[in-house]
Amino acid sequence: MKNLWLKNYFFLIIFLLAGFSFVYPQKDNDDAAAVFLSQLIQKPSVTGNEGVAGRFLKDFCEKKGLNVRIFSDTDSTYNFCASLYPLGDKKPNIVFLSHIDVVPAGDIYNWTHPPFAGVIDGGYVWGRGAIDCKGLLVMQLFAILNYLEDAKNSELPYNLSILMVSGEEGGNNNGSDYISNNHLAELNAVVIFGEGGSGLRDFLPSDPELAVFGISVSEKKALWLMLTAETPSSGHSALAPEVYANKRLLRALIRLMNEKKIVTFDKSSRRMFRELGKIEGGVRGFFISHIHWGILTPFVKSYYSEGGELYSFVNNTFVITRISNPASGYNQISDKACAVLDYRLLPEIETSKYIRKIENVVGPRIDIQILLETPGARHSDPDSKYFDAMAAALKETYPGQSRTIPILFPATTDNNYYRSKGIPVYGIMPCIFSRELLDTVHNYDERIAVNEIYTGIRTFITCIDILQKDLKYDDTPAID
Protein backbone atom coordinates (compact mmCIF):
# COMPACT_ATOMS: atom_id res chain seq x y z
CA MET A 1 0.00 0.00 0.00
CA LYS A 2 2.51 2.61 1.16
CA ASN A 3 5.16 1.07 -1.04
CA LEU A 4 3.30 2.48 -4.06
CA TRP A 5 3.62 6.02 -2.69
CA LEU A 6 7.23 5.66 -1.71
CA LYS A 7 8.34 4.33 -5.07
CA ASN A 8 6.34 6.84 -7.08
CA TYR A 9 7.47 9.80 -5.01
CA PHE A 10 11.06 8.72 -5.60
CA PHE A 11 10.55 8.45 -9.36
CA LEU A 12 8.66 11.73 -9.40
CA ILE A 13 11.70 13.51 -8.08
CA ILE A 14 13.93 11.84 -10.66
CA PHE A 15 11.65 13.03 -13.44
CA LEU A 16 11.31 16.55 -12.18
CA LEU A 17 14.87 17.16 -11.20
CA ALA A 18 17.91 15.02 -11.87
CA GLY A 19 19.69 11.78 -11.05
CA PHE A 20 21.18 11.47 -7.60
CA SER A 21 22.65 9.12 -5.03
CA PHE A 22 21.81 8.76 -1.35
CA VAL A 23 24.16 9.04 1.58
CA TYR A 24 22.72 6.97 4.43
CA PRO A 25 24.53 7.22 7.77
CA GLN A 26 24.79 4.21 10.06
CA LYS A 27 25.60 3.84 13.72
CA ASP A 28 25.16 1.16 16.33
CA ASN A 29 22.75 2.09 19.10
CA ASP A 30 21.19 -0.02 21.84
CA ASP A 31 19.01 2.72 23.33
CA ALA A 32 15.50 2.15 24.57
CA ALA A 33 13.45 3.06 21.48
CA ALA A 34 15.40 0.79 19.13
CA VAL A 35 15.26 -2.08 21.63
CA PHE A 36 11.54 -1.55 22.10
CA LEU A 37 10.98 -1.61 18.34
CA SER A 38 12.94 -4.86 18.21
CA GLN A 39 10.69 -6.34 20.89
CA LEU A 40 7.55 -5.13 19.13
CA ILE A 41 8.62 -6.72 15.84
CA GLN A 42 9.01 -9.97 17.77
CA LYS A 43 5.24 -9.88 18.38
CA PRO A 44 3.97 -10.97 14.94
CA SER A 45 0.80 -9.07 14.09
CA VAL A 46 -0.19 -9.91 10.54
CA THR A 47 -3.65 -8.45 9.91
CA GLY A 48 -6.25 -10.37 11.87
CA ASN A 49 -3.79 -11.36 14.59
CA GLU A 50 -3.11 -8.10 16.40
CA GLY A 51 -4.10 -9.15 19.93
CA VAL A 52 -0.70 -10.23 21.26
CA ALA A 53 1.13 -7.15 19.95
CA GLY A 54 -1.71 -4.87 21.06
CA ARG A 55 -1.64 -6.16 24.64
CA PHE A 56 2.15 -5.87 24.70
CA LEU A 57 1.83 -2.21 23.72
CA LYS A 58 -1.00 -1.61 26.19
CA ASP A 59 1.00 -3.11 29.08
CA PHE A 60 4.03 -1.01 28.19
CA CYS A 61 1.97 2.19 28.11
CA GLU A 62 0.34 1.44 31.46
CA LYS A 63 3.69 0.66 33.12
CA LYS A 64 5.06 3.97 31.85
CA GLY A 65 2.13 5.83 33.42
CA LEU A 66 0.03 6.72 30.38
CA ASN A 67 -3.75 6.67 30.59
CA VAL A 68 -5.06 3.77 28.51
CA ARG A 69 -8.50 3.55 26.92
CA ILE A 70 -9.21 0.18 25.27
CA PHE A 71 -11.82 0.35 22.50
CA SER A 72 -11.74 -3.33 21.46
CA ASP A 73 -9.81 -6.31 22.81
CA THR A 74 -9.81 -9.59 20.90
CA ASP A 75 -7.07 -11.71 19.39
CA SER A 76 -8.06 -10.49 15.95
CA THR A 77 -8.92 -6.86 16.73
CA TYR A 78 -7.13 -4.64 19.21
CA ASN A 79 -7.71 -0.88 19.28
CA PHE A 80 -6.66 1.45 22.07
CA CYS A 81 -5.50 4.94 22.92
CA ALA A 82 -2.74 5.92 25.36
CA SER A 83 -2.59 9.54 26.51
CA LEU A 84 -1.00 11.91 29.01
CA TYR A 85 -4.37 12.84 30.53
CA PRO A 86 -7.54 10.73 30.63
CA LEU A 87 -9.70 11.26 27.58
CA GLY A 88 -12.53 12.08 29.98
CA ASP A 89 -10.77 15.36 30.82
CA LYS A 90 -11.81 16.58 27.37
CA LYS A 91 -8.63 18.55 26.82
CA PRO A 92 -7.91 19.51 23.20
CA ASN A 93 -6.00 16.50 21.97
CA ILE A 94 -3.04 16.14 19.60
CA VAL A 95 -3.46 12.58 18.35
CA PHE A 96 -0.78 10.45 16.72
CA LEU A 97 -2.12 7.56 14.65
CA SER A 98 -0.42 4.25 13.86
CA HIS A 99 -1.55 0.73 13.05
CA ILE A 100 -0.50 -2.43 14.86
CA ASP A 101 -0.93 -4.87 11.98
CA VAL A 102 1.61 -5.72 9.31
CA VAL A 103 1.52 -7.53 5.97
CA PRO A 104 2.72 -11.17 5.72
CA ALA A 105 6.46 -11.79 5.56
CA GLY A 106 6.45 -14.00 2.46
CA ASP A 107 9.19 -16.59 2.05
CA ILE A 108 11.29 -16.24 5.21
CA TYR A 109 14.33 -17.67 3.40
CA ASN A 110 14.50 -14.49 1.31
CA TRP A 111 15.21 -12.44 4.43
CA THR A 112 18.72 -11.63 5.64
CA HIS A 113 17.41 -11.90 9.20
CA PRO A 114 14.21 -13.71 10.25
CA PRO A 115 11.29 -11.33 9.64
CA PHE A 116 9.94 -11.48 13.19
CA ALA A 117 13.24 -11.64 15.09
CA GLY A 118 13.72 -7.86 15.40
CA VAL A 119 17.47 -8.17 14.90
CA ILE A 120 19.55 -5.01 15.48
CA ASP A 121 22.48 -5.23 13.11
CA GLY A 122 24.67 -2.78 11.22
CA GLY A 123 22.85 0.25 12.59
CA TYR A 124 19.40 -1.02 11.55
CA VAL A 125 16.41 -2.67 13.21
CA TRP A 126 15.32 -5.49 10.88
CA GLY A 127 11.92 -7.10 10.51
CA ARG A 128 8.39 -6.88 9.21
CA GLY A 129 6.86 -3.59 10.27
CA ALA A 130 10.17 -1.82 10.96
CA ILE A 131 8.97 1.00 8.70
CA ASP A 132 5.31 0.15 8.09
CA CYS A 133 4.18 0.95 10.66
CA LYS A 134 5.80 -0.13 13.93
CA GLY A 135 8.78 2.15 13.45
CA LEU A 136 6.52 5.18 13.18
CA LEU A 137 4.48 3.96 16.17
CA VAL A 138 7.60 3.79 18.35
CA MET A 139 8.68 7.30 17.32
CA GLN A 140 5.26 8.72 18.21
CA LEU A 141 5.00 6.82 21.48
CA PHE A 142 8.45 7.80 22.74
CA ALA A 143 7.82 11.43 21.83
CA ILE A 144 4.71 11.41 24.04
CA LEU A 145 6.58 9.70 26.89
CA ASN A 146 8.94 12.67 26.90
CA TYR A 147 6.09 14.75 28.42
CA LEU A 148 5.08 12.45 31.27
CA GLU A 149 6.88 14.38 33.98
CA ASP A 150 5.72 17.72 32.60
CA ALA A 151 2.13 16.51 32.71
CA LYS A 152 2.53 15.43 36.33
CA ASN A 153 4.08 18.70 37.45
CA SER A 154 2.02 21.18 35.44
CA GLU A 155 -1.16 21.47 33.42
CA LEU A 156 -0.21 21.28 29.74
CA PRO A 157 -2.55 23.04 27.33
CA TYR A 158 -2.92 19.99 25.06
CA ASN A 159 -3.45 16.35 25.80
CA LEU A 160 -1.13 14.08 23.80
CA SER A 161 -2.39 10.70 22.64
CA ILE A 162 -1.32 7.83 20.45
CA LEU A 163 -4.12 5.88 18.80
CA MET A 164 -3.10 2.33 17.87
CA VAL A 165 -5.48 0.41 15.64
CA SER A 166 -5.94 -2.89 13.86
CA GLY A 167 -6.76 -3.88 10.32
CA GLU A 168 -5.17 -1.07 8.32
CA GLU A 169 -3.39 -3.40 5.91
CA GLY A 170 -6.48 -5.51 5.31
CA GLY A 171 -9.02 -2.86 4.41
CA ASN A 172 -10.04 -1.91 7.95
CA ASN A 173 -13.66 -2.27 8.91
CA ASN A 174 -12.92 -2.89 12.60
CA GLY A 175 -10.06 -0.48 13.23
CA SER A 176 -10.13 3.16 12.18
CA ASP A 177 -13.53 2.71 10.54
CA TYR A 178 -14.92 1.55 13.89
CA ILE A 179 -13.07 4.23 15.92
CA SER A 180 -14.03 7.10 13.64
CA ASN A 181 -17.70 6.14 13.73
CA ASN A 182 -17.99 5.36 17.44
CA HIS A 183 -15.30 7.07 19.51
CA LEU A 184 -14.20 10.22 17.70
CA ALA A 185 -15.94 12.58 20.12
CA GLU A 186 -14.20 10.84 23.01
CA LEU A 187 -10.80 11.39 21.39
CA ASN A 188 -11.50 15.14 21.12
CA ALA A 189 -8.79 15.48 18.46
CA VAL A 190 -7.88 18.92 17.15
CA VAL A 191 -5.35 17.36 14.77
CA ILE A 192 -4.10 13.89 13.85
CA PHE A 193 -0.63 13.04 12.63
CA GLY A 194 -0.60 9.71 10.79
CA GLU A 195 1.55 7.86 8.29
CA GLY A 196 2.24 9.29 4.86
CA GLY A 197 5.19 11.04 3.28
CA SER A 198 8.86 11.08 4.22
CA GLY A 199 12.06 12.89 3.31
CA LEU A 200 14.54 12.70 0.44
CA ARG A 201 17.94 14.33 0.13
CA ASP A 202 20.51 14.91 -2.64
CA PHE A 203 18.10 15.42 -5.51
CA LEU A 204 18.17 19.20 -6.00
CA PRO A 205 21.12 19.96 -8.30
CA SER A 206 21.22 23.50 -6.99
CA ASP A 207 21.27 22.39 -3.33
CA PRO A 208 22.16 18.69 -2.87
CA GLU A 209 22.18 18.97 0.93
CA LEU A 210 18.56 20.10 1.04
CA ALA A 211 16.14 17.47 2.37
CA VAL A 212 12.61 17.79 1.00
CA PHE A 213 9.84 16.30 3.11
CA GLY A 214 6.38 15.56 1.77
CA ILE A 215 3.55 15.87 4.31
CA SER A 216 0.38 14.32 2.92
CA VAL A 217 -2.72 16.51 3.08
CA SER A 218 -4.86 14.25 0.92
CA GLU A 219 -4.71 10.75 -0.51
CA LYS A 220 -6.41 8.32 -2.81
CA LYS A 221 -9.29 6.18 -1.62
CA ALA A 222 -9.40 2.41 -2.04
CA LEU A 223 -12.19 0.70 -3.95
CA TRP A 224 -12.00 -3.10 -4.11
CA LEU A 225 -14.35 -4.69 -6.62
CA MET A 226 -15.22 -8.26 -7.54
CA LEU A 227 -16.21 -8.77 -11.17
CA THR A 228 -18.12 -11.97 -11.88
CA ALA A 229 -19.06 -13.60 -15.19
CA GLU A 230 -21.47 -16.53 -15.29
CA THR A 231 -22.68 -18.65 -18.19
CA PRO A 232 -25.12 -21.55 -18.15
CA SER A 233 -22.70 -23.89 -19.86
CA SER A 234 -20.25 -26.18 -18.16
CA GLY A 235 -18.90 -29.36 -19.54
CA HIS A 236 -16.02 -30.87 -21.42
CA SER A 237 -13.39 -28.38 -22.59
CA ALA A 238 -13.11 -30.19 -25.91
CA LEU A 239 -16.65 -29.05 -26.71
CA ALA A 240 -16.44 -25.42 -25.64
CA PRO A 241 -19.28 -23.04 -26.54
CA GLU A 242 -18.59 -19.76 -28.31
CA VAL A 243 -18.76 -17.83 -25.03
CA TYR A 244 -17.98 -19.24 -21.59
CA ALA A 245 -17.36 -17.57 -18.23
CA ASN A 246 -13.58 -17.25 -18.37
CA LYS A 247 -13.67 -15.86 -21.90
CA ARG A 248 -16.36 -13.32 -21.01
CA LEU A 249 -14.47 -12.13 -17.94
CA LEU A 250 -11.14 -11.85 -19.73
CA ARG A 251 -12.69 -9.80 -22.51
CA ALA A 252 -14.14 -7.42 -19.91
CA LEU A 253 -10.79 -7.09 -18.15
CA ILE A 254 -9.00 -6.36 -21.42
CA ARG A 255 -11.52 -3.61 -22.19
CA LEU A 256 -10.84 -2.07 -18.79
CA MET A 257 -7.08 -2.21 -19.28
CA ASN A 258 -7.36 -0.64 -22.74
CA GLU A 259 -9.65 2.16 -21.59
CA LYS A 260 -8.30 5.62 -22.31
CA LYS A 261 -6.80 7.24 -19.20
CA ILE A 262 -7.83 10.77 -18.23
CA VAL A 263 -5.10 12.76 -16.50
CA THR A 264 -6.45 14.76 -13.57
CA PHE A 265 -4.72 17.39 -11.46
CA ASP A 266 -6.70 17.98 -8.29
CA LYS A 267 -6.33 20.63 -5.61
CA SER A 268 -3.68 18.70 -3.69
CA SER A 269 -1.51 17.69 -6.63
CA ARG A 270 -1.51 21.21 -8.06
CA ARG A 271 -0.39 22.61 -4.73
CA MET A 272 2.29 19.91 -4.49
CA PHE A 273 3.81 20.77 -7.87
CA ARG A 274 3.53 24.51 -7.23
CA GLU A 275 5.49 24.25 -3.97
CA LEU A 276 8.08 21.97 -5.50
CA GLY A 277 8.56 24.44 -8.34
CA LYS A 278 9.16 27.24 -5.85
CA ILE A 279 11.93 25.23 -4.23
CA GLU A 280 13.63 24.51 -7.53
CA GLY A 281 13.26 28.03 -8.92
CA GLY A 282 14.29 29.27 -12.34
CA VAL A 283 12.97 27.96 -15.64
CA ARG A 284 12.79 24.39 -14.42
CA GLY A 285 10.85 25.53 -11.37
CA PHE A 286 8.39 27.44 -13.56
CA PHE A 287 7.67 24.31 -15.60
CA ILE A 288 7.18 22.24 -12.46
CA SER A 289 4.80 24.79 -10.94
CA HIS A 290 2.71 24.87 -14.12
CA ILE A 291 2.94 21.24 -15.11
CA HIS A 292 -0.87 21.00 -15.30
CA TRP A 293 -1.02 23.48 -18.17
CA GLY A 294 -2.34 21.83 -21.31
CA ILE A 295 0.32 23.52 -23.42
CA LEU A 296 2.96 21.40 -21.66
CA THR A 297 1.20 18.08 -22.36
CA PRO A 298 3.26 17.13 -25.45
CA PHE A 299 6.43 17.41 -23.40
CA VAL A 300 5.29 15.38 -20.38
CA LYS A 301 2.67 12.99 -21.80
CA SER A 302 4.93 9.93 -21.53
CA TYR A 303 5.26 10.46 -17.79
CA TYR A 304 1.46 10.25 -17.39
CA SER A 305 1.22 6.94 -19.24
CA GLU A 306 0.82 3.69 -17.36
CA GLY A 307 4.18 2.82 -15.87
CA GLY A 308 5.31 6.45 -16.05
CA GLU A 309 6.70 8.27 -13.04
CA LEU A 310 3.61 10.46 -12.55
CA TYR A 311 0.96 7.90 -13.42
CA SER A 312 -0.31 7.24 -9.90
CA PHE A 313 -0.42 10.92 -8.96
CA VAL A 314 -2.73 11.99 -11.78
CA ASN A 315 -4.69 8.87 -12.73
CA ASN A 316 -7.23 6.55 -11.20
CA THR A 317 -5.50 3.18 -11.12
CA PHE A 318 -6.40 -0.46 -10.70
CA VAL A 319 -4.58 -3.75 -10.37
CA ILE A 320 -6.05 -7.20 -10.94
CA THR A 321 -5.12 -8.95 -7.70
CA ARG A 322 -7.00 -12.23 -8.13
CA ILE A 323 -8.68 -14.33 -10.83
CA SER A 324 -10.50 -17.48 -9.75
CA ASN A 325 -13.00 -20.23 -10.60
CA PRO A 326 -14.87 -22.70 -8.46
CA ALA A 327 -12.99 -25.99 -8.07
CA SER A 328 -13.28 -28.14 -11.19
CA GLY A 329 -11.34 -30.54 -13.32
CA TYR A 330 -8.63 -29.34 -15.66
CA ASN A 331 -10.72 -30.41 -18.64
CA GLN A 332 -13.99 -29.00 -17.31
CA ILE A 333 -15.43 -25.66 -18.38
CA SER A 334 -16.28 -23.50 -15.39
CA ASP A 335 -19.64 -21.74 -15.42
CA LYS A 336 -18.35 -18.94 -13.18
CA ALA A 337 -15.26 -16.69 -13.23
CA CYS A 338 -14.31 -13.98 -10.74
CA ALA A 339 -11.67 -11.27 -10.63
CA VAL A 340 -10.78 -8.93 -7.78
CA LEU A 341 -9.67 -5.42 -8.75
CA ASP A 342 -7.94 -3.01 -6.40
CA TYR A 343 -8.81 0.52 -7.54
CA ARG A 344 -7.15 3.63 -6.11
CA LEU A 345 -9.25 6.67 -6.95
CA LEU A 346 -8.22 10.29 -6.86
CA PRO A 347 -9.80 12.22 -3.98
CA GLU A 348 -12.46 14.08 -5.92
CA ILE A 349 -13.87 11.02 -7.72
CA GLU A 350 -17.46 10.05 -6.83
CA THR A 351 -17.59 6.27 -6.42
CA SER A 352 -21.10 5.69 -7.75
CA LYS A 353 -20.37 7.58 -10.97
CA TYR A 354 -17.09 5.76 -11.39
CA ILE A 355 -18.72 2.35 -11.00
CA ARG A 356 -21.30 3.30 -13.65
CA LYS A 357 -18.39 4.10 -15.92
CA ILE A 358 -16.89 0.66 -15.24
CA GLU A 359 -20.28 -0.95 -15.96
CA ASN A 360 -20.40 0.79 -19.33
CA VAL A 361 -16.96 -0.58 -20.20
CA VAL A 362 -17.42 -4.20 -19.09
CA GLY A 363 -21.02 -4.57 -20.31
CA PRO A 364 -24.25 -5.75 -18.71
CA ARG A 365 -23.27 -9.42 -18.36
CA ILE A 366 -20.57 -8.72 -15.77
CA ASP A 367 -21.74 -8.44 -12.19
CA ILE A 368 -19.87 -5.88 -10.04
CA GLN A 369 -19.73 -6.22 -6.27
CA ILE A 370 -18.09 -3.71 -3.91
CA LEU A 371 -15.81 -5.54 -1.47
CA LEU A 372 -14.38 -2.44 0.20
CA GLU A 373 -14.67 1.30 -0.12
CA THR A 374 -12.65 3.64 2.06
CA PRO A 375 -13.86 7.20 2.65
CA GLY A 376 -13.18 9.90 0.14
CA ALA A 377 -10.47 12.28 1.22
CA ARG A 378 -11.07 15.80 2.31
CA HIS A 379 -8.17 18.13 1.76
CA SER A 380 -6.42 19.02 5.03
CA ASP A 381 -5.40 22.65 4.81
CA PRO A 382 -1.62 23.04 4.46
CA ASP A 383 -1.99 26.66 5.52
CA SER A 384 -2.59 25.73 9.15
CA LYS A 385 -0.60 25.99 12.36
CA TYR A 386 -0.45 22.18 12.56
CA PHE A 387 1.21 21.82 9.16
CA ASP A 388 3.43 24.79 9.93
CA ALA A 389 4.48 23.28 13.27
CA MET A 390 5.56 20.03 11.64
CA ALA A 391 7.36 21.90 8.86
CA ALA A 392 9.17 24.03 11.45
CA ALA A 393 10.09 20.93 13.46
CA LEU A 394 11.62 19.30 10.39
CA LYS A 395 13.52 22.47 9.65
CA GLU A 396 14.87 22.56 13.21
CA THR A 397 15.87 18.90 13.08
CA TYR A 398 17.72 19.56 9.83
CA PRO A 399 18.79 23.21 10.31
CA GLY A 400 19.35 24.98 7.03
CA GLN A 401 18.94 21.68 5.19
CA SER A 402 15.22 21.00 4.73
CA ARG A 403 12.07 22.21 3.04
CA THR A 404 8.57 20.82 3.36
CA ILE A 405 5.81 20.56 0.78
CA PRO A 406 2.19 19.36 1.01
CA ILE A 407 1.58 16.28 -1.11
CA LEU A 408 -1.18 14.12 -2.50
CA PHE A 409 -0.44 10.63 -1.20
CA PRO A 410 -1.02 8.24 -4.14
CA ALA A 411 -1.90 5.30 -1.89
CA THR A 412 -4.43 4.72 0.90
CA THR A 413 -4.00 4.81 4.68
CA ASP A 414 -6.31 5.16 7.68
CA ASN A 415 -6.03 8.95 7.50
CA ASN A 416 -9.12 9.31 5.32
CA TYR A 417 -11.42 7.87 7.98
CA TYR A 418 -10.67 10.90 10.15
CA ARG A 419 -10.43 13.47 7.38
CA SER A 420 -13.91 12.45 6.30
CA LYS A 421 -15.15 13.47 9.77
CA GLY A 422 -13.67 16.95 9.50
CA ILE A 423 -10.47 16.40 11.51
CA PRO A 424 -7.29 17.85 9.97
CA VAL A 425 -4.89 14.96 9.33
CA TYR A 426 -1.27 15.24 8.20
CA GLY A 427 0.71 12.19 7.12
CA ILE A 428 4.45 12.14 7.81
CA MET A 429 7.19 9.77 8.84
CA PRO A 430 9.95 12.26 9.69
CA CYS A 431 12.82 10.22 8.29
CA ILE A 432 15.03 10.34 5.23
CA PHE A 433 14.94 7.08 3.28
CA SER A 434 17.12 5.70 0.52
CA ARG A 435 15.77 3.89 -2.54
CA GLU A 436 17.02 0.63 -1.08
CA LEU A 437 15.05 1.18 2.12
CA LEU A 438 11.90 2.24 0.28
CA ASP A 439 11.95 -1.00 -1.67
CA THR A 440 11.77 -3.05 1.54
CA VAL A 441 8.29 -1.79 2.48
CA HIS A 442 5.90 -4.75 2.02
CA ASN A 443 8.95 -6.58 0.72
CA TYR A 444 11.87 -8.61 2.01
CA ASP A 445 14.49 -7.22 4.42
CA GLU A 446 12.34 -4.38 5.73
CA ARG A 447 14.47 -2.35 8.14
CA ILE A 448 14.99 1.12 9.55
CA ALA A 449 18.18 2.88 10.62
CA VAL A 450 18.51 3.33 14.38
CA ASN A 451 19.57 6.95 13.96
CA GLU A 452 16.39 7.66 11.98
CA ILE A 453 14.28 6.40 14.90
CA TYR A 454 15.80 9.00 17.20
CA THR A 455 15.66 11.73 14.57
CA GLY A 456 11.96 11.00 14.18
CA ILE A 457 11.37 11.17 17.94
CA ARG A 458 13.17 14.51 18.16
CA THR A 459 11.10 15.89 15.29
CA PHE A 460 7.81 14.92 16.91
CA ILE A 461 8.95 16.42 20.23
CA THR A 462 9.85 19.68 18.51
CA CYS A 463 6.48 19.79 16.75
CA ILE A 464 4.67 19.22 20.06
CA ASP A 465 6.71 21.96 21.75
CA ILE A 466 5.74 24.43 19.05
CA LEU A 467 2.05 23.58 19.34
CA GLN A 468 2.04 23.62 23.17
CA LYS A 469 3.33 27.18 23.04
CA ASP A 470 0.82 28.24 20.40
CA LEU A 471 -2.47 26.99 21.80
CA LYS A 472 -5.49 29.06 20.98
CA TYR A 473 -8.10 28.15 23.53
CA ASP A 474 -10.84 28.22 20.91
CA ASP A 475 -9.28 25.08 19.43
CA THR A 476 -12.11 22.58 19.29
CA PRO A 477 -12.51 19.41 17.26
CA ALA A 478 -14.26 19.85 13.92
CA ILE A 479 -16.36 16.70 13.98
CA ASP A 480 -19.22 16.11 11.56
Image (tube, rainbow, N blue to C red):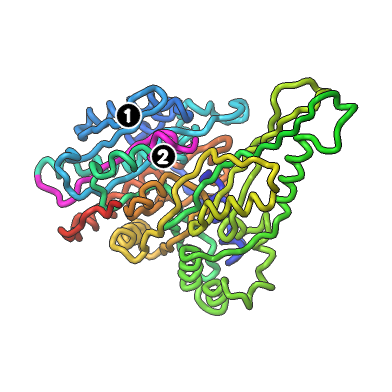
Q: Quadrant of residue 40?
A: top left
In the picture, measured across the screen, residue 409 lies left or right of residue 400, that is right
Q: Amino acid at mark 1?
A: Ser
What's the residue at 53%, 41% (across, down)? 441
In the picture, measured across the screen, residue 12 lies left or right of residue 377, that is right
Residue 135: which numbered mark, if any?
2
In reply to whether residue 170 is colored magenta, the answer given is yes
The residue singled out by tag 1 in the image is: 72
Task: Look at the picture and state if 37 lies above or below 386.
Answer: above
Q: Nearer the viewer, residue 56 or 32?
A: 56
In the picture, measured across the screen, residue 322 lies left or right of residue 239, that is left
Q: Nearer the viewer, residue 150 or 343?
A: 343
Give the mark nearer the N terminus: 1 vs 2.
Answer: 1
What's the residue at 43%, 30% (across, down)? 41
Q: Quadrant of residue 396?
A: bottom left
User: Circle 1 — which element?
Assistant: strand
Q: Quadrant of residue 55?
A: top left
Let me know if residue 440 appears in the view: no
Provide residue 366's location: percent of width, then percent of height.
68, 42
Mark 1 vs mark 2: give the one in front: 1
Q: Nearer the viewer, residue 249 or 284?
A: 249
Within 10 Å of disc 1 (Cα), the crowding (few <14, some 14-19, many 20+) is some
Q: Nearer the viewer, residue 366 or 378?
A: 366
Q: Amino acid at mark 2?
A: Gly
- In three-dimensional space, the C-alpha distance between marks 1 and 2, rounded to whole angstroms, equals 23 Å
Residue 419: which numbered mark, if any?
none
Q: Which residues are magenta?
A: 154-177
In the picture, measured across the screen, residue 418 lies left or right of residue 147, that is right
Which residue is farthest top? 329
